[in-house]
Amino acid sequence: MYLKISRENLRKWLTELKKGAEVLVPEKVNGLWTYTPFQGQDPLPNFLNSRIPPKSVFFPSMQALVEWKSSGGSVQLRSLTPAAGPKVLFGLRPCDARGLRILEPVFSQDNQDIFYGQNLSRTLLLGVACRRPCPGSFCEQMGIDPQAAKDFDLSFREITQGFIVKVITEKGGKLTGGGVFFTEAAAKEWEEARSEIKNKNETLSFDLEKVKTRVGERFTDEEFWMRVSLKCLNCGICTYLCPTCHCFDICDLQIPGQGIRFRCFDSCAFPGFTKMAVHNPREEKWRRYRQRVSHKFNFFPQNFQNVACVGCGRCVVHCPVNLDLRQVLLAISG
Amino acid sequence: MNEQVQEKNIYHPHLMEIIKVIPETGDTKTFHIKFQDQTLAKSFSFLAGQFAEYSVFGEGEATFCISSSPTRLTHLEFSVKKVGRVTSALHQLNEGDLIGFRGPYGNHFPLDKLRGQNLLFVGGGIGLAPLRSLIHNVVDTREDYRQITILYGARTPQDLCFRYDLEAWVKNPTLTMVPTVDAGDKNWKGKVGLVPMVLEELKPSPVETVAITCGPPIMIRYTLKALDKLGFTPPQVWTTLEMKMKCGLGKCGRCNIGPLYVCKDGPVFSLEEIRNFISDEF
């Protein structure tokens, strides 16, 4: 089913949705794009993608898990639960929606992590097709179509007058209900709204299938990993900005009489990540870089079928020393 | 989307009370703990080799094996060497203090593969803790096993853990207990020598025998070599691996050895499995 909505009606519709749900849209805060509560603005002017991926809406950089009150030797523990109630995330990109789905089995398999699971299941994903390539991105090489996404509930394509919308899920369809803001559209209009992305980066193209086979074979090639990781600073920005990195730490915070236990992002780039009492199996930098690349392109697919990379390009653009993952993947496949 | 989300916080610890603290060595203590909640105490079960996340509120969580036996469920025991923040905080605690407990997690020793076999335990230092759980277990069901030999070593006599157990095992006529130290003192009457060397001297027969080892990484490495020399094949040798963990549930991503999670797929592995690991990172 296809629908059409004008820019003006989109604003009205989101305003209407806000009455019954938490509505997040892209907004520039301190010069950086992020997802913030909708305030009636025209969404998406010049929006490419958010600096921090929307994984942080579902798996925040800091999440309290339990809290306690203590007095005179006794402890009262209280289990925290994720916030409830419907939530709408508008404007997210196909790559990031794929990232959210890739992370789903990590948190839901075997032992259900309610924090990620409930946050995702209460949220409707309203995605918007890309019109321009993001710097450093290689989404198409990772098998992601920046013009469509099966991972959304509603998929939007921008046209001059507004948007053509493809209804992907029943829940998404219900959200558009009433016919007040939307009018019906034809499949042809959806096809015509597909915009060709110009100025794509073709120079650093690698064969993903080859990468997947060769990354395992390369594992024991120490010299290779030393060479490709040489300039890495272990700053961890690639892991913090990655839509599929999910490693976390669990820590306590306490003031007299009360405290919380929370989880927070952690990074395999840090030497302390695997440091134990007696030894550290990934003391050397090349081992840590090898772990990151192997986890994404070898171990993760073995455990969860998907490669843990969506080609969003954040790690490429924001690496302070220009360690370009595309070049590393090209070298692996070569 | 997954609509069937369980209403259960997997990171929620249970409160347990410390009922006894036993100093083992200068830097290691064993804690006896019991559930505050009687219903939980009754329903709780685990298998030898499993571990848990223990916490001091305000200091954080740390991973230790359960060192008591599933056949002795009146309380749980775990042993801690003082090395970092959480372990130092644990060492400050006394009887009556409360700690957090999540578990049991991980796989366990393969009792089905051990029954009817001779058992050879090779332990070093605090590495006796997970073996001790299994040793008590097989001692309590002694008729299921044939000869049981325990080789245990530490740096000096003062570094031997669980001395009360060692004494009981020496006196137990159905066990062969061989204690050794790297360097003895004037009162030491046992063997002097590194565990792998004493193992080679002992020459245990590999026939219908399963070897289970745990200790510092360097001891495990040379013990595996010694066992190979003695004719033990990889499926006959079992060990438990240590990796830094946080969640214990396969989520937090740090205990990976290649595609395996030590917390979910381990911590107990056969040498056969370890040989096939893609990675040497353990």
Image (cartoon, rainbow, N blue to C red):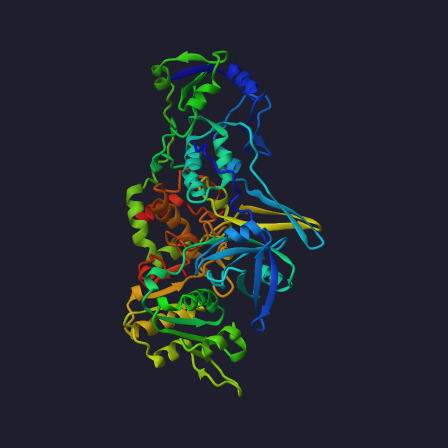
Residue A197 sits in which quadrant?
top left
B134 vs B226, nearest the viewer: B134
Q: Quadrant of the C terminus of chain B?
A: bottom left
Q: Is residue A207 visible?
A: no
Tell me if residue B192 comes above or below residue B224 in the rendering.
below
Tell me if residue B5 comes above or below residue B47 in the rendering.
above
A244 vs B15, nearest the viewer: B15
Residue A301 sits in which quadrant?
top left
Q: What x and y, as percent, mark residue A140?
A: 35, 34
Q: What x and y, as percent, mark residue A122?
A: 50, 30
Residue at image location 45% in from the left, 53% down from the top: A231
Tell me if residue B138 comes above or below residue B53 in the rendering.
below
Q: Is residue B149 visible?
A: yes
Q: What x and y, as percent, mark residue A269?
A: 47, 52
Q: Quadrant of the N terminus of chain B?
A: top left
Name the residue furthest bottom: B186
Residue at image location 37% in from the left, 50% down from the top: A294
